[in-house]
Amino acid sequence: MSEAIVPEFDREAYRGVRDRTREMIDRGARMIAIVTRENDDGTMEMIYVFDREQKIVDFRFQILPEWEIDSVADIFRGALTLEREAVDLFGLKIKGVSPGIFLEDGKSPVAPLRRKRTTAPGGDADE
Amino acid sequence: MSKVTTIPFGPQHAAFLEPLNVKLTLEEEKVVGAVLNQGYNHRGMEYALSLDYKKSQYLAERVCGICSFHHSSAYCQGLETIYGIEVPERARLIRTIMMECQRLTSHLLALGHIAEAVGYENLFMQCFREREHVMTLVNRISGNRVHYSMNVVGGVKRDLSEEGTKDVLVTMRDLRPKLEELQRVFARDSTLSKRTRGVGKLPKQAAMEWGNVGPVSRASGIPQDTRLDGFAAYSMVQFAPVVREEGDCYARMMVRMDECLQAVDIIEQCLPLLQDGPVAVQVKGHPKGEAFSRVEAPRGELLYYIRAKGTLGLDRIKLRTPALMNVASLLVMLPGCQLADVPTITVSVDPCICCTDR
């Protein structure tokens, strides 16, 4: 996997996640969800979903799984639960966010929603 | 200086219907800190739902036993958006009626649970007695009490017969005075009042910051209700979100109680709008595309994100359940309360762990 597969646009968006979240909140939006999904090439897509005046709006960007994303939980406190879930289920790195909201370290499958995943004791080998 | 003690509250606790652990830090009987520990019921539903989009219209109902129809509605709506199909009006009305029936069963369960948490067993039983009328009604309509299995992508697979329509009308007519009586008890009973007023306060600002939804946010003065989007047939009926300003257990309880009567209103508005016609349209081929779909489940806004790749398996399905956001705000409500109030506060959030953990 090479970093070149993530375009510059996504790199900028990844670096600006806090600014974009703050901009949304300042405009009166409410964060609904953080959707994480894995692309076929192993890169991850992050979708930050908001409600603004009864309409769903989002911003999204691609990252490499080893990149560390800035947390937005100090901008929108409810985001902490959403970020912890992404860390648990996809093994993402988010600054200052610890895993363990749903899964248990050493006992649960590691990053169970990743396509090419490694497993811990108790996890089912897949792919 | 009083001694600081840490005690586990749950995961198995008489006040909880499902496993949730709150680690409480106490000074004497006063709660000074709380840490949530979730995940006892994590089933990997997002993974399971992505395996076969056809089976998932039934599996989505199994995410939760209390708001099962809302889950399948959100799922079907999402796929209908991807297919770009228009669901027949009759099907949208039937979905709305069933969703409001489920709001009644869910809210009456939550109200009974609150009554039980404060030690009012008799009121708990009265709530469940009235709830049973709705449970048997949905059983007569759908053949099931919990998982209605009525939704399909494109509409519903069970029509509401003329007899069924009268059945709904009579049941709602009989239920209304009983709900009004319950409303009087919940609003005026001194025991309930003493145990819930001013307890477990969630200020409006905190509710906004924590992204609370549903009755929890409306009880803190936020008039947010996904039904205002007009999904299903909500654009065809008149209603306004039930909002209170207090932000305490009493407000959360009363919002649910008032929403029970609102549900009866909405159902009664839907029934005369039912016109003869199809209840589903056929869809062809595997879905390909992306959609966000949301409904107002009894506990609040339920969001489904679906990304389909033109195969039987889905690329990604993500559920953001209302309880996930609401349970987290216990960290605001619990500090400062008395230990004896912890069950009431926790139950006032209506914590559905099936939804939270998935």
Image (spheres, coloured by chain):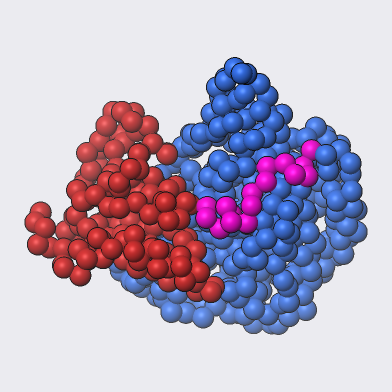
Chain colours: A red, B blue
Q: Is residue B204 magenta?
A: yes
Q: Nearer the viewer, residue A117 or B280?
A: A117
Q: In which quarter of the image is residue B43?
A: top left
Where's the N terminus of chain A, which quadrant?
bottom left
**Residue B66 shown left or right of residue A84 in the figure:** right
Q: Position of residue B88 (x, y in %)?
A: 58, 79
Q: Is residue A30 above or below residue B26?
A: below
Q: Position of residue B196 (x, y in %)?
A: 77, 42
Instruction: Write down the region rendered in magenta.
Output: B195-210
**Residue B185 shown left or right of residue B266 in the figure:** right
Residue B95 appears in the figure: no
Residue drawn 37% across the image and 32% down it: A104
Where's the C terminus of chain A, which quadrant?
top left
Residue B27 appears in the figure: yes
Residue drawn 19% across the image and 54% down it: A64
**Residue A113 shown left or right of residue B70 in the figure:** left
Q: Where is residue B44 in the image (x, y as percent from the top left)?
A: 41, 44
Q: In this view, does B59 lie above or below B261?
A: above
Q: Is residue B102 magenta?
A: no
Q: Which of B49 and B352 is in front in this view?
A: B352
Q: Nearer the viewer, residue A30 or B162?
A: A30
Q: Position of residue A74 (x, y in %)?
A: 42, 51
Q: In which quarter of the image is residue B81?
A: bottom left
Residue drawn 30% across the image and 46% down it: A95
